[in-house]
Amino acid sequence: MNDKSGWDIVLFHLGKTPVSIAGLIDFSFIVLLGFILRHFLKRTLAARAQTQSSPQTRHMMGLLSTLAANLVFALFIVIALDNLGVRLSFLGGTLGVLGIGIGIGLQNLAANMIGLVVILLEKSIQIGDLIEIDGVLGTVVEIKGRSTTVMSRDNIAIIIPNAHLISNKVINWSHRDPKTRMHLKVGIGMDPALLDKAVDILRTLALSHPDILPDPPPAVWFTEFGASSFNLELVYWINDVTLRHTTLSDLNFRIAREFQAAGIDLPYPHNVVIFSHGPDAAGGPSPPSPIAPGTPAGG
């Protein structure tokens, strides 16, 4: 007579381990419990992260909450397998072979994950920062496990691997202090009497511009004597580097109009070419004239 109940009937064998209906029910219950706990833990930690004032801290806590929830779920999977009678040593050989293949294919992913840890710990790049890398200028909108998303000024999303961010030179225009000093170079006609007027116009235009900071105040430098101009440089500060091109263009338009109204010349490079016609140009003897055919010498 068979003493086994219907729940103890062996359905199949996993290696040498028999798997019954009761074992599968216990396995499913533990996995379900782990899934519920994972969802609860992730939601609780995510809500805690939203209470942080710093965007970088919120983002870091959000990533850590996902990692912690997944680790808890993985622990429940291990417990469920152990309750089922499956020992991890049984899966060791298979996982070892798969691990070699997966490890080779996931080298870049591991490097990007390490890059994420470095970025979060150093806080050298944060969400909302304006960065420039490989000639691309944009705002950081998202930092994920594998990559960072940068939105360019043309509203184009650029996906940059995290490993690339920590192994290459990155210009962070927003790091620590958002103020940026800009330079505008302009050459005027070589008339010393107009120098002071040109300096006053440049300084006045900079002080009246709404995007230029009054402190530190704008300054005008006389940089050099050019080939055909006095070269000046207007130095000013702005608080938003995304406006640097529009501010520069606006100043150029205003400078051109104000200089024209003040009679200040904006010279352009030019060369003077002097043609020489031989010794006549220097007052020397002229070359002998050619003798016509058939004319006797001395005639």
Image (cartoon, helix red, strand yellow):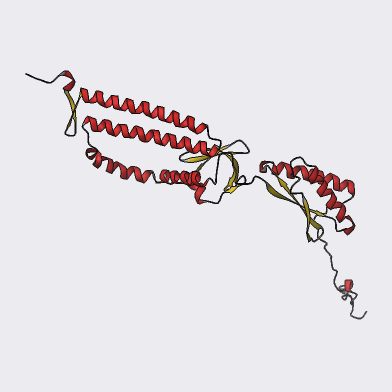
What residue lies at 71% left-to-right and 49% top-to-bottom? 182
Tell me the quadrant of the picture where the N terminus can be found: top left
**Residue, far left:** 1
Residue 287 sits in quarter: bottom right
Q: Residue at x 67, y 43 (%)?
A: 241
Residue 168 vs residue 52, the one in the foreground: 52
The answer to whether residue 238 shows anywhere in this view is yes
The C terminus appears in which quarter of the rendering?
bottom right
Task: Identify which residue, 296 or 99, lies in the foreground.
Answer: 99
Q: Residue 85, position in %: x, y?
A: 21, 32
Residue at image coords 88%, 59%: 192
Q: Is residue 86 above or below residue 163?
A: above
User: Can the viewer see residue 265 in this picture?
Assistant: no
Q: In x, y percent, where is residue 141?
A: 56, 37
Tell which residue pokes out farthest to the right in this image. 299
Q: Quadrant of residue 103?
A: top left
